[in-house]
Image (cartoon, rainbow, N blue to C red):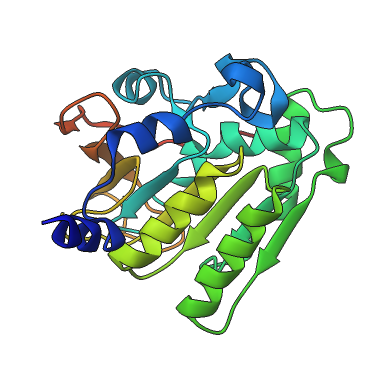
């Protein structure tokens, strides 16, 4: 029986409750410090959407891996990560972009940081890596997290195995970064994600659907969230990148 349980844990199909609790503790003494060594309240960063923040119990939590399943690329998912990017820049921590579908647009990032009140937005560190394979991407992600230097890690992948997600989960628990995996629509079999958010887009029929500029309404379906049942939130206007 013990061997069977261990096999399930190795596959990422389950984990121990005590391990979850311990991995959620902060890196400071007695759990007094949270993300980037600050007060524990910074364990969470907003998504920028109050309704989604409420459903997530406060927003995105550091030391966790959050999955965003996107029906269409650039359907407002990056705007949900903008507050985490701002938090990383404020703490002078780099943001890593692993295998993104397009190069980040530097002027838009700088404009967002300037609007957020950062005095020197051009000094923000954004590192883009385009590994040759998904195995290399996973290796790079683990190496970055083990270094302890990342503020935010964004990883794009077609799909990740349960073992790969489990490895990311363990690496994320050792750091204070916010970690996100962006992918297409996946099935609902068990994975070691803290959050599984499905982003569903209802296109505006009055405009042609363009891959680089979708329009319409978005609906967020939480397949998995900490401390709550799966939930489908009401449709919202398509969120835009802060500018």
Image quadrant assignment for residue 19:
top left
Residue 73 relative to residue 8: left or right:
right
Q: Nearer the viewer, residue 41 or 9?
A: 9
Q: Residue at x 37, y 59 (%)?
A: 165
Image quadrant assignment for residue 157:
bottom left
Q: Check the picture and name the quadrant holding the N terminus.
A: bottom left
- Seen from this angle, which residue lies furthest front? 2
Q: Check the picture and name the quadrant holding the C terminus.
A: top right
Q: Position of residue 123 (x, y in %)?
A: 87, 44
- Let me know if residue 121 appears in the view: yes
- Let me know if residue 203 appears in the view: no
- Position of residue 24 relative to residue 110, above or below, is above
Residue 163 relative to residue 168: left or right:
left
Q: Residue at x 34, y 47 (%)?
A: 193
- Seen from this angle, which residue lies furthest bottom? 132
Q: Position of residue 72 (x, y in %)?
A: 33, 58
- Position of residue 152 relative to residue 226, above or below, is below
Q: Residue at x 42, y 24 (%)?
A: 49
- Position of residue 114 relative to residue 32, above or below, is below
Q: Nearer the viewer, residue 112 or 189?
A: 189
């Amino acid at each position: 029986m013990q061997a069977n349980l261990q096999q399930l844990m190795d596959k990422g199909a389950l984990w121990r409750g005590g391990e979850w609790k311990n991995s959620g503790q902060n890196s400071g003494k007695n759990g007094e410090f949270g993300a980037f060594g600050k007060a524990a309240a910074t364990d969470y960063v907003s998504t920028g959407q109050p309704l989604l923040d409420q459903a997530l119990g406060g927003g995105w939590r550091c030391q966790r891996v959050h999955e965003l399943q996107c029906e269409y690329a650039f359907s407002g998912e990056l705007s949900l990560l903008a507050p985490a990017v701002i938090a990383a820049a404020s703490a002078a921590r780099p943001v890593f972009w692993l295998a993104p579908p397009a190069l980040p647009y530097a002027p838009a990032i700088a404009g967002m940081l300037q609007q957020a009140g950062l005095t020197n937005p051009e000094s923000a560190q954004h590192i883009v890596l385009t590994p040759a394979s998904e195995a290399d991407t996973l290796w790079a992600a683990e190496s970055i997290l083990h270094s302890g230097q990342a503020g935010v890690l964004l990883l794009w992948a077609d799909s990740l195995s349960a073992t790969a997600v489990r490895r990311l989960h363990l690496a994320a628990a050792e750091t204070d970064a916010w970690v996100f995996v962006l992918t297409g629509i996946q099935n609902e079999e068990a994975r070691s994600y803290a959050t599984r958010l499905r982003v569903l887009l209802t296109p505006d029929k009055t405009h042609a659907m363009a891959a680089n500029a979708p329009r319409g309404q978005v609906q967020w379906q939480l397949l998995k969230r900490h401390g709550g049942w799966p939930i489908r939130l009401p449709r919202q206007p398509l969120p835009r990148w802060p500018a």
